[in-house]
Image (spheres, grey):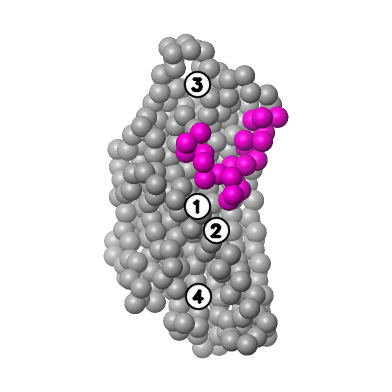
């Protein structure tokens, strides 16, 4: 497996992004000499290989968004989602391979700006498994986050990354029921109970916020998911203006079914970056404050999903 982990916390901020070409979405507002700057970076990847069952149905969703607001030309903002790719290879009799990968970056200078970038992907696969048959696959998961600011209390940077999979018994469910299950998977208010409803699951995710609220990096899994590699490097120092979190997990899912079953596997990847430099008593500051508060509340709801069971 690739050596994802950092050699030291002094590693260059652009260590991974320089290798990628921004092909999904880029926004640049103005250009000026830097007085104060913010930086946010999020990278996430999930790879599933060696599936023991064939699938007659595979569907995927891959999307990326950017949004930037600046009060004037002296506050440039740059957003990059690169490359935000989801690949599914289904060529029987070879095992199915699923890979979803994205990098998001946000840069801001001076003050009175807000920049947001995010990616979402989802892969849905359906399988028929005979009585006594084992359903199994291998996986690799990776999350890398970093935030940096120059002026604490004035600037803010936030980074989130998340990958995961859930296996459901969909025997007897209608196509509409499965579609509803799939639609709910990427919504914040409905996916927190997926661990309890799924036969098997795995999640790896984290959050960084330069304001010191909600820094976290953790993994979660069910009993039939096994880790062979599990490592992480973090710096959550609230006094630091540069924080990072990196985690890599390798493992497998192995489960045997005592009756003929129809199974649906969901795999997801998410990244989110935000930078802001609000100035008090301006309309933009109010917008930035409200947006970041909503994002923090959203992650607090999701954080239970990551940390309620086995912590890394």
In the displayed structure image, the side of residue 179 where residue 55 appears, left or right = left
Horizontal side, residue 218 vs residue 157: left or right = left
Identify the residue under disc 4.
Answer: 156
Q: Does residue 182 show up magenta in the picture?
A: yes
Q: CA distance from mark 1 to mark 2?
A: 7 Å
Magenta region includes residue 226:
no
- Which dot marks residue 298? 2
Q: Neighbour class for label 3 at 10 Å: few (<14), some, many (≥20)? A: some
Q: Earlier in the sequence, mark 4 or mark 3?
A: 3
**As rendered, which of 85 and 125 lies closer to the eye?**
125
Indicate which disc residue 53 carries: 3
Category of crowding for the residue at label 1, using alpha-carbon neighbours closer than 10 angstroms: few (below 14), some (14–19), many (at least 20): some
The picture places residue 10, in percent across and down from the top left corner, at 32, 70
Work out whether mark 4 precedes mark 1 in sequence or the reverse, and give the earlier one.
4
User: Relative to residue 3, is residue 152 depicted above or below?
Assistant: below
* Pointer 3 or 1: first along the chain: 3
- Secondary element under disc 1, as helix, strand or loop, is helix
User: Which contiguous range is marked in magenta?
Assistant: 176-197
Magenta region, mostly helix, strand or loop?
helix
Answer whether residue 290 is visible to the viewer in this image: yes
Secondary structure beneath label 2: helix
Q: Nearer the viewer, mark 4 or mark 2?
A: 2
Report the residue marked by disc 1. 302
* Distance between mark 3 and mark 1 Cα atoms: 31 Å
Can you tell which of label 3 and label 1 is closer to the viewer? 1
Badge 4: residue crowd in 10 Å (few <14, some 14–19, many ≥20)? many
Q: Secondary structure at mark 3?
A: loop
Real-space Cα separation, disc 3 to disc 2, in angstroms: 36 Å
Q: CA distance from mark 4 to mark 2?
A: 17 Å
* Residue 149 position within the rendered picture, expressed as x and y whole percent measured from the top left: 45, 77
């Amino acid at each position: 497996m690739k050596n994802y982990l950092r050699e030291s916390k002094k590693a260059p901020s652009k260590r991974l992004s320089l290798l990628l070409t921004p092909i999904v979405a880029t926004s640049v507002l103005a250009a000026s000499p830097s007085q104060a700057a913010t930086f946010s970076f999020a990278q996430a990847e999930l790879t599933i290989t060696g599936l023991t069952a064939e699938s007659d149905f595979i569907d995927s969703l891959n999307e990326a968004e950017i949004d930037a607001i600046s009060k004037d030309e002296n506050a440039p903002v740059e957003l990059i989602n690169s490359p935000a790719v989801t690949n599914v290879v289904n060529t029987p009799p070879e095992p199915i391979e699923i890979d979803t990968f994205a990098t998001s970056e946000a840069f801001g200078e001076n003050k009175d700006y807000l920049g947001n970038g995010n990616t979402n992907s989802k892969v849905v696969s359906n399988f028929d498994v005979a009585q006594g048959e084992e359903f199994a696959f291998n996986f690799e998961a990776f999350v890398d986050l970093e935030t940096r600011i120059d002026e604490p209390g004035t600037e803010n940077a936030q980074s989130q990354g998340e990958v995961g999979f859930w296996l459901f018994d969909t025997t007897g469910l209608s196509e509409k029921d499965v579609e509803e299950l799939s639609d709910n998977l990427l919504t914040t208010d409905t996916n927190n109970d997926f661990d309890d409803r799924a036969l098997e699951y795995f999640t790896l995710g984290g959050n960084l916020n330069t304001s010191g609220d909600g820094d976290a990096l953790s993994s979660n899994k069910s009993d039939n998911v096994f880790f062979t590699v599990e490592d992480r490097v973090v710096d959550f120092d609230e006094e630091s203006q540069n924080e990072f979190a990196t985690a890599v997990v390798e493992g497998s899912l192995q489960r045997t079914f005592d009756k003929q079953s129809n199974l649906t596997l969901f795999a997801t990847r998410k990244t989110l970056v935000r930078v802001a430099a609000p100035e008090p008593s301006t309309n933009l500051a109010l917008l930035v404050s409200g947006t970041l508060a909503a994002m923090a509340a959203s992650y607090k709801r999701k954080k239970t999903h990551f940390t309620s069971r086995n912590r890394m």
